[in-house]
Image (spheres, grey):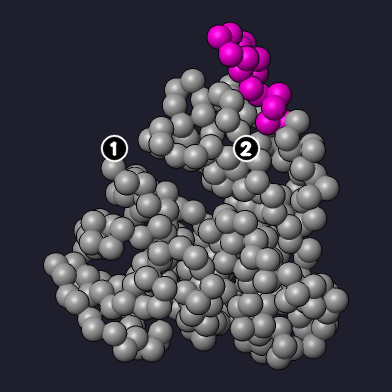
Amino acid sequence: MATKTPIVILTGYLGSGKTTLLRRLVALSDQRLAIIMNEFGALAVDARVVAGKNIKIAELEGGCVCCSLLGDFEAAVKEIVETVGPDEIIVETTGLAEPDALIGDIQENLPDYPIDAVVTVVDADATVRFPSIGHTGRIQIEMADLLLLNKIDLVTDEQRRKAREMIRAINPAALILETTRCEIDPALIFGKPLRRDNRKEVHEREKEGHHPSMESFQLRTDQTLERDCFEKRMGQFPPQIYRAKGFVRFPEGVFLFNFVAGRSELISFPEENALGIIFIGEKVLSLQPVIEAQIAACAIPPDHSSDRS
């Protein structure tokens, strides 16, 4: 079975802060990342550049790599996986790109590379000064699972509120986080446990009123679950849950469960994956018993079939 390497799509208008976010992800993530972007220089790459058939690769810190396209996008992604073996691939679009075409391309032509999340960085200051965001900016916001309203330190509270209302009107479903220099925990993007050393930063931002109280917990799911029941229950998750990701077993086999801002999917995976789901959201620790009960209700008793829906 082919390797199913997840892809994160990072978009946003020119100067919104995408490169700042990339630097943060490279510095804080404990995963091996491959970043596909147009310009190596934006990440201050000093390492030796190796050219392949469809990509140029330069090493970054912590085992991450930066990749620049030389050929076809689909071939380049496959070459990255074969050459580098990353845990996640981040595709940074240009500021003038509309990500819907890229999303469709990946879904149609790269079925073994599930889209983990679409992240859009929005410049709060530019949104206030130039409220006519145009067609491209609107599409970037519409397609997002996670919206970072960045540079809020450059606007007043009233301007920040108006900018938030503007992007919420365009995309009612996405999670909106207000940031300065894209300071968020990478776990929100990748579906990993929240970093312990991030708690002080989050607490300070809560006091300023710019950051929800994000928490995470892991739920073990060793039992085989009834798929119809599980799909029904995940549609009933409380709205405070922004992110959930992990592996579950159905009678048909093991599947990757990926949930982000109300969007969910189940993707068949090999048996060797450890079972369990990470849940991330606003004060979700208080919801843990409810979610555990919802999942437990879908468990199939050993040596029994289940007809529950």
Under mark 1, the amino acid is Met
Pick whichever, 88 or 38, lies toward us.
88
Query: Which residue is rendered at x = 63% and y = 52% of the image?
Result: 243
Q: Position of residue 95 (x, y in %)?
A: 45, 78
Residue position for label 2 = 220
Q: Which residue is mark 1?
A: 1
State the residue at coordinates (61%, 83%). Answer: 181
Q: Is 302 included in the stretch rendered in magenta?
A: yes
Please give the range of residues in magenta: 294-309
Tell me where residue 27 appears, x and y as whole percent.
50, 77
Kind of residue indicated by mark 2: Arg
Viewed as shown, does residue 167 lie left or right of 74? right
Element under disc 2: loop
- Crowd around label 2: few <14 · some 14–19 · many ≥20 (10 Å): some
Which quadrant does the N terminus fall into?
top left
Residue at position x 58%, y 30% in the image:
222
Q: Is residue 266 above or below residue 155?
A: above
Predominant SS along the magenta part: loop
